[in-house]
Image (spheres, rainbow, N blue to C red):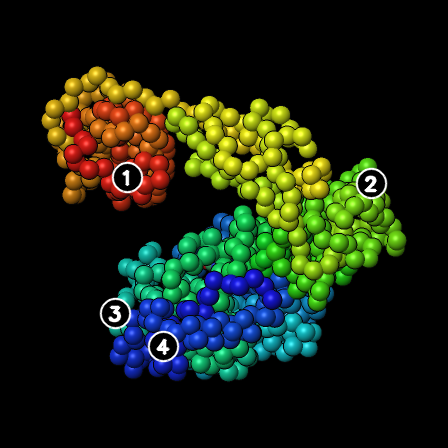
Amino acid sequence: MPAARRSRSLAFAASLAACGGAPSTPADTTSVASTTSVTAFTPEEVAAAQKEQDQRMAWWREARFGMFVHWGLYAIPAGAWNGATHHGEWIRDTARIPLQEYDQLQAQWNPTAFDADAWAQLAAAAGMKYLVLTSKHHDGFCLYPSGFTDWDVAGSKNGRDIVGELARACAKHGVKFCTYHSIMDWHHPDYLPRRPWEAATRSTDGADFRRFESYLHAQVTEIVQRYRPAVMWFDGEWESTWTHQHGLRLWSLCRALAPEMIVNNRVDVHRAGMNGFSMAEGALGDFHTPEQEIPANGLPGQDWESCMTMNGHWGWNAADGTWKTTTALLHNLIDIASKGGNYLLNVGPRADGTFPPEAVERLQGIAAWMKVCGEAIHGTTASVFDPLPWGRCTVKANGDTTTLYFHVFDWPRDGQFVLPAFANEIVGNPRLLGGAEPGLLFALGDAIPTGTVNVPATPPLPHANVIAVRVKGSPQPFRAPLVVADGDTFVGAMAVRLRANGPDGEVRYTLDGSEPGAASPRAGDAIPLTATTRLRAQTFAGGTRPVGAAIDRTFTKLEPLPPTKQRATQPGLRVERFAGDFSKVPDDLDARQAEATTTTPTIALPANVGERVLLRHRGVLAVPKDGLYHFVLTSDDGSVLRLDGQTVVDHDGLHGPTEKRGTIALMAGDHTFDLVWFNRTGGATLALQWHAHGAKPAAIDAAALRH
Ligand code: FHN
């Protein structure tokens, strides 16, 4: 049973409460309870919803690997339009193809070579336990005969029900069939907003988004009732017309239609960009959807799936030769599984219904590896070790033992493989998957393995090789000692504590940069630091053997800057305004003539500050006591904060409203303050917060600013 998960079923409970369990169609929905506070639910309700979600997610968590298929009319131009060849599934938008012109593609839709069985077999052989097909992408064209539009395969020369054929082929080959359905619809007259470039030529008169929502609900209903997808993978949820309330109604519709059906987080509006995570309270969805990226550390207790392409496009692009190698694709799979996620690997079929040969070649290479090593992916959970420089680890509990799968990317050519340290007793012989038995010898030492394993100089498999070690009980890895410290810089003195992180073991450390040994000081009480210090520490098992990753951190003592002798008696800051088409803060600002000079009591942009403008705020900042001060600077466009002439935060350049942080050591008293900000065009944002070590960030009080 995976570790307890932060309950995403709170959202499930919320949706039940908000819509009473049975969704009302949008047309007659007068009001949907605002997102019910999830705290309004009893622990029993949350537990029941969590249990139901765990049951729904069980096969998905076991699967770890699926196939994404982006297919539709956009495969016909194959990325080319009016001489450009960079387009993909967005071609109607990126090539600005008027609706009437794009509609003509329907008559050209004729995938005579489409073979659902072949697709399903390739997925099954590659160990892809589920397949997600675009039943409708943003262009609105449906790959199945819809009862609610003629903009579908039924209206084409080749009326085959692609969704239906693939659903049946997947069932035949033991692959869960799933559908991707875009909320955003560039074809339906009621969908808003229009593409910006067609707003003038495609009227919005009569468009009724509530009627579009009914259409969307009707299509989702026909897809679920007709094809029973195991996952409904929504997308295109980011435009202003789609709100949390729309998401709540669509989520509740899915829950009511098929309680066992999994729904991704793009049903709702809380996705944090391409990183795909929705951590807002009450966010809806069964799993997060990072796209074209693998989270650095995964997210313990959360279900997430990285969807990624094999080359540079989701939809077929004949000119795109940037195919990732089979090794890279397998390393992605292993990396994702080692972090507890799923890998949804995309294929963009050609217009005739065949997979590109480059995709087939990679799927077959993956299949050959998975045939030998699939056990090290399917049904596994995340690594329990610190990051491993030579590869990854996946874990599989089986009764009162656990199998640790060490995926070795960098094979030891000297035949000596050092296992990551753990305190468990080993059961039986470790196995080299795909190797000749008993090719793997194991030098057992004391209760904790010596860690060195004799392996063949040449590994048996391409791409990655897996050493499977079965141990008693649940894993007891030795990990890097935990360091408890206020931060990496300090003023005056700082105490640091070291803690063992894992099974019993002594933590030993040095403060002179030397490598810790069995005779080094043992960590216990706080370690006082009064100067810049390089701390190195490691756990020693049995008092003698270094195990687990080592710590190597430098704590820097900062001398606080003395107060300025500048006299400043007037409240607030002086603000100089400069005009110009800036893309960065100019170096010669001191030599420039401001077009206007005013004062401001606090740091805030004037109303209607305008574009092509730079403001320079100068004066002194009164610092209450010696210490470290942290600054949080948020701006659009660029900004730079200097104190006593030292750059504290450099957030220069053209960018959206983002934040950057910086730290400086200051003595009590006045310090010269210089904050430059500029806006080229568009949005204008400037905010500055500060806080002493351990306090909460807050705006700088007017009383602390003078000039
Ligand atoms: O706009 C789509 C894109 O075409 C593709 O479908 C990806 C796959 O997840 N999703 C959207 C971009 O986030």
Q: Which residue is mark 2?
A: 415
- Which tag, 2 or 1, sits closer to the chain's start? 2
Dot 2 amino acid type = Gly
Question: Could you tell me which quadrant the N terminus lies in?
Answer: bottom right
Query: Is residue 8 among the parts visible in the rendering?
Result: yes
- Residue designated by label 4: 17
The answer to which of marks 3 and 2 sits earlier in the sequence is 3
> In this view, which residue lies farthest toward the front?
525
* Residue 249 location (% of width, % of height): 37, 74
Tell me where residue 71 appears, x and y as whole percent. Answer: 55, 65
Q: Are marks 3 and 1 in contact (CB under 8 Å)?
A: no
Q: Earlier in the sequence, mark 1 or mark 4?
A: 4
- The residue that label 1 is drawn on is 689
The residue to which callout 3 is attached is: 205
The residue nearer to you, when weighing 681 against 481, is: 481
Label 3's element?
loop
Which residue type carries mark 3? Asp
The residue located at (42%, 62%) in the rendering is 236
Residues marked 2 and 1 touching at CB (< 8 Å): no
Q: Can you say whether 547 is above or below 190 in the image?
A: above
Mark 3–mark 4 CB contact (< 8 Å): no
Q: Upstream in the sequence, badge 4 or badge 2?
A: 4
User: What is the distance, in whole Å, between disc 4 and disc 2 at their CAs?
Assistant: 60 Å
Q: How many marks?
A: 4
Q: Position of residue 175 (x, y in %)?
A: 65, 71
Viewer-side residue, 550 vs 83: 550
